[in-house]
Amino acid sequence: MGTVTAYEHGDLGIEKIRVYPTTMSLDISKMCDARAMDAQQVQTDFLIDKRGVNPPWEDTVTMAVNAANSMLTDEDRQAIRLLIVGTETAVDQEKPVSSWIHRFLKLNSQCRNFEVKHACYAATGGLQMALSWLASPMSGDHKALIISADQSLISIGEAHEHVTGAGAAAVLLSKQPRLIAYELGKNGIYAAEVSDVIRPTPRVETGNGGLSLVSYFDALEEAYQNHTEQLDEEIDFNTYFDWNLYHMPFAGIAYRAHRTLVLMSGNYSKQETRQFYQQKSEPTTHFARLTGGTYGATTFVGLLGLVETASGFEAGQRLGIFAYGSGSCAEFYSAIILPEAADVAQEAGLEKLIADRYSLSIEEYETIETIRDQNLMAADFIPDRNICGDWYKRRYEGQGHLVLNNVVGHYRHYEWS
């Protein structure tokens, strides 16, 4: 297919990657039973089996730190001179979450850090800015850390409850990539203002689901078209890309997205379209259907799923990536698979992290979500670590995870477990 020889594409990309899928999960079948929904239909249409849930002692800051901390060596911490955090669930409206993350990751004091917001596109926007910095003489031998961390607001009984979730992803970008190397300058962009999903206050998330889907697919078509305009050659979508990865607010959207681009490239039957999807994109849904909605982290969740499960996966292959954020902004770009990709994915250990989560009952899930919602803007808050029995003691104590200790007069206090 589109195999490329090593470093023909450049040498900037992902050196390390981690995903933090939270330490608790809820089976979607339990949610469907409690809401009188057809679990089989939901799982078939949306490709969702489980979703991540945050305990009261975790938030956007702890997820971000817990995602990145285990992969960073002392040398990495000194080499990182740019930290960009994408989130739409910041815990403060003035102080960026990156300040706490910079502190608890013990990064160099000369590290620029800031928080960016553009719904699920934020981390991708930050990643592209970081690549530009790394490509410039200003970066020297330094590295950049990009983190995406988000969680859904309470949605008990809402129509979109089954597509909610929580999680964080961290990627270390450098001039010594091991997972993928990005093809610089081959970026298709599309931006158009639309109020498809909004969070007018920290406790309110609203919007129009139908409009959001229309905006997603409009952006996909336009961003891909713009991508092809950046190339020096005419390409065939089905042969130019060996793999395709899409933003997944729910894993089931990957097929619809892939079908859209396949049909843009030619007149194919439904059977042929399904076959192209199964060959090139379905492996990206492996972890996504077990994490639920992870916002901007979803492309990195999908990337690990691809590397871990795809058949015929090898170095030199080209990966097409689509990112979308409500509001809206989208980007279609590409990367080349590197020889150490499988090792990097194995180091991330996402399969085990997902398997080791505490499986909540519907009552425990509703209690946790209610507590989190009630205290989202509280001036004073002490998380109850006895929720779910001895889970905190078993999973956190002595494990070196960052947790929220308390909130006093709006000041947040974190500690290592």
Image: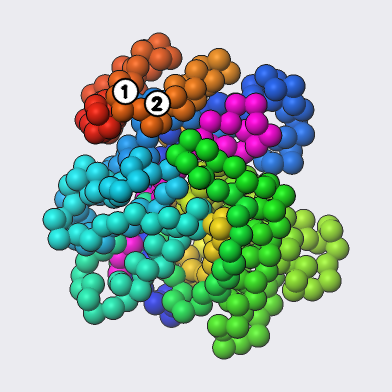
**Image point (55%, 72%), residue name:** 189
Q: Is residue 281 left or right of residue 329?
A: right
Is the C-beta separation of discs 2 and 1 under 8 Å?
A: yes
Quadrant occupied by the N terminus: bottom right
Residue 122: x %, y % from top left: 45, 57
Residue 65: x %, y % from top left: 30, 42
Is residue 156 one of those drawn in magenta?
Answer: yes
Quadrant occupied by the C terminus: top left
Name the residue nearer the viewer: 14 or 98.
98
**Image point (55%, 26%), residue name:** 26
Q: Which mark is residue 375?
A: 2
Q: Is residue 39 visible?
A: yes
Task: Give the residue type at disc 1.
Answer: Phe
**Image point (22%, 76%), residue name:** 138
Residue of label 1: 381
> Which of the two discs, 2 and 1, labels the residue nearer the N terminus?
2
Other-residue count near label 2 (Cα within 10 Å), few / some / many at <14 / 14–19 / ≥20: some
Q: Is residue 4 above or below residue 65?
A: below
The single residue placed furthest to the bottom in the displayed view is: 232
Is residue 139 one of those drawn in magenta?
Answer: no
Q: Quadrant of residue 323?
A: bottom right
Q: Is residue 63 visible?
A: no
Q: Magenta segment, which residues?
A: 148-175
Residue 29: x %, y % from top left: 66, 25
Q: Is residue 329 above or below residue 380?
A: below
Please tell me whether mark 1 sits on a helix, a strand or a loop. Answer: loop
Residue 201: x %, y % from top left: 47, 41
Q: Which mark is residue 341?
A: none
Q: CA distance from mark 2 to mark 1?
A: 7 Å
Task: Give the residue type at disc 2.
Answer: Asn
